[in-house]
Structures are given as C-alpha cells and as structure tokens.
Image: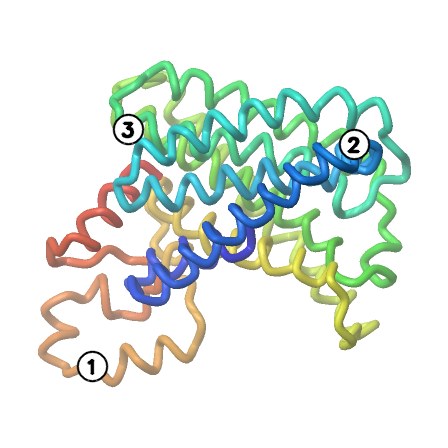
Amino acid sequence: MGSAIVSIDLYADHQPVLSAIMGWFAAGAWLLLAGVLGVRLAYQRDRFAREASSPASFTGVAGTAVLGTRFAMQDYHAVAAALLAVSGVGWALLLIPVLRHWETPTAGTSFLLSVATEGLAVLGATLAVSYRAGWLVSAAVPALILGLALYVFTAARFDLRELVTVHGDHWVAGGALAISALAAGKVTGAAAALGQFSRQHQILTTSTLVLWCLAMVWLLPLVAGEVLRPRLTYDVRRWATVFPLGMYAACSLATGRVTGITGIARLRPSVDVGRIHRQPARVRRAAPSRLAGAAWSLPSRRSRFGYVICRDDQQA
C-alpha cells in the first residue's frame, strides 16, 4: 500500500521511471502477499480466521484499491477493474468479522476500515471516467459517505495516548482523512466529467476542501507526538506512516485541482523547488505553471506520461 501510493505521487511529479519501479515493486509485493494468504487459508485456517477479524486485515483491501488506481493512471484499465472487483469482494467478506470483534479504545490500525472504504471510492471514480460509466460515480458516492461515517465511528473511540506511545500506525488517523479528501476530489472531478451531480458540484467541491483542511489539522498532533517522544528504533508498524504521508501529497493534488486553489496543488519539498529554479529562465517563462515551484502542476507538453497525468488530474 505504501509503495503504491509513493508510485502514484512520483507519477504525478513527472518521475515515470521511479514511479514504474515503485509500482511494479508494489505489484510484486501484492502477488507475494496474495500467495501467503492463500497458503494460510489452505493450511492455517485458524490463524487466517483470527487475522481476518482484525481491522488490520483491511490493509489488503486498501492496498489492492490503491494499486488498482496506479494501474488505472497508466491506462491498464482491465487490470484496475479486476483489482476493484477483488477489493470490493474482500471488503464485503471482511466487514462483518471485523465489526463482530471490534475493540475499544480503537488504535491507528482501526482506521483502516475507513481507508479501505475510501480506497474503493477513489478507484471507482477513477475508472468511471475511463469507461464513461456513470454508475461507478453513483457507487463511489455512498462509499465516500460510508467511509466518513466509519471514520467518525472510529475517531470517537480513538485513544489519543497512541500519539506518543505507539510506533507508527497512529499516523493512519490522519491518512484516513487524507484519502477521504482524495476520494471526494476524485468523485467531484468524475461527476463533472460525466455531467453528473451538477447541482451538487459546489457541495462536493467544498466537502473536498473541508476534508483536506481536517486532514492537515491532524498533522499538528501527529508531528508534535513524534517531537515530544521520538521513536527512532525500527518497528514494522512504522511502515504504516509511509502510506499517510504519501496520501497527504496525493490528496493535496486532487484538492488543488478541484478547488482551483493553486497553493494547495503546489505543495512540494524544497529540494524540488531548487531543481526548478535551476531551470533556464526561458523555460520558466514558457511554462510558469509547471516551473514556479509546483510539485503537482500539469505538464504543458502532451507526452504519453503527461497526457495520462493531465487526464487523471481532470478527474480529480
């Protein structure tokens, strides 16, 4: 899941080679983990059932949806549609066992239920434009709303002490809102492209911005917790921090494009700003929107990669 979202971010930042490396690594990891789950289902059914009743099991659903979104960005629509089906079936099969064994107070991994639901909305809205399938947008809207309801349900029972005690998975609390903002942006863009929900367009746009702002608010306590209690030793749960950070970048791109607030879409590390300012002045004048410090602005030329990014951003 973390590798796939990093691949998506690199693709949007016009780094096709690095994006492809991360993307195929994510695909390979997905196949490996699918094989591991198959073995456990065949030979360790008790362990499989126990793990399937944990909110962490929705990592597979969310990861499948994010990987499908990455494939959809590069026009592998059939693969993306297959992954949407797999993630949808997985979500339906896991929901009841997880809710039956729900524990409070909730932990960072508990938010994966919301993340997985929003992941379905993101992939559904992305494929809706590719296939000109309005019904996918209509299906993505309730998924978006349900994901937000599950987020509220989880957040109301979240133990805030996890911000300074656990080793990484607490970041999913912010990442879940970030992917909600991304889902809202994708649904808004897809609906506009297909001529749906025209009367609700302003509501969808405003909702995207509000969700982005709420996700950014989460950064304050998350970063403060890391500063007040540094956790520098390796812990496998720290991988749960990678996905939220990548999702913050992706949702900023989508929110900036949907709302037209360029300051949001232009968020980027300072090292990239330095790279931009080293470009010749003639090039900067020729494409100011691409070179004026915007990590997520659209390329002006219609290369294959540029075209895919442009079209995907229009969906956002």
Query: Which tag, 3 or 2, sits closer to the chain's start?
Result: 2
Query: Which tag, 1 or 3, sits closer to the chain's start?
Result: 3
Q: Residue, x 27% and y 77% (percent of image)? A: 276
Residue 194, x across and y down, in percent: 26, 22
| Residue beneath disc 1 | 279
User: Would residue 275 be found to the left or right of residue 166 on screen?
Assistant: left
Quarter of the image with the C terminus in it: top left
Q: Nearer the viewer, mark 3 or mark 2?
A: 2
Q: Residues within 10 Å of mark 3 (few under 14, many from 20)?
A: many
In-front residue for pair 158/35: 35
Q: Give the SS element for disc 3.
A: helix
Q: Residue, x 20% and y 58% (percent of image)? A: 299
Determine contact: label 1, label 3, CB under 8 Å: no
User: Would residue 227 be found to the left or right of residue 200 on screen?
Assistant: right
Report how far apart the C-alphas of labels 3 and 2 lie in the structure: 40 Å
Tell me if residue 58 comes above or below residue 133 in the rendering: below
Amino acid type, residue under disc 3 in the picture: Val
Report how far apart the C-alphas of labels 1 and 3 lie in the structure: 35 Å
Determine contact: label 3, label 2, CB under 8 Å: no
Q: Nearer the viewer, mark 1 or mark 3?
A: 3
| Residue beneath disc 3 | 129
Amino acid type, residue under disc 1 in the picture: Gln
Q: Give the SS element for disc 1.
A: loop
| Residue beneath disc 2 | 45
User: Would residue 128 be found to the left or right of residue 30 on screen?
Assistant: left
Q: Give the SS element for disc 2.
A: helix
Q: Residue, x 43% and y 33% (percent of image)? A: 123
Residue 215, x across and y down, in percent: 60, 48
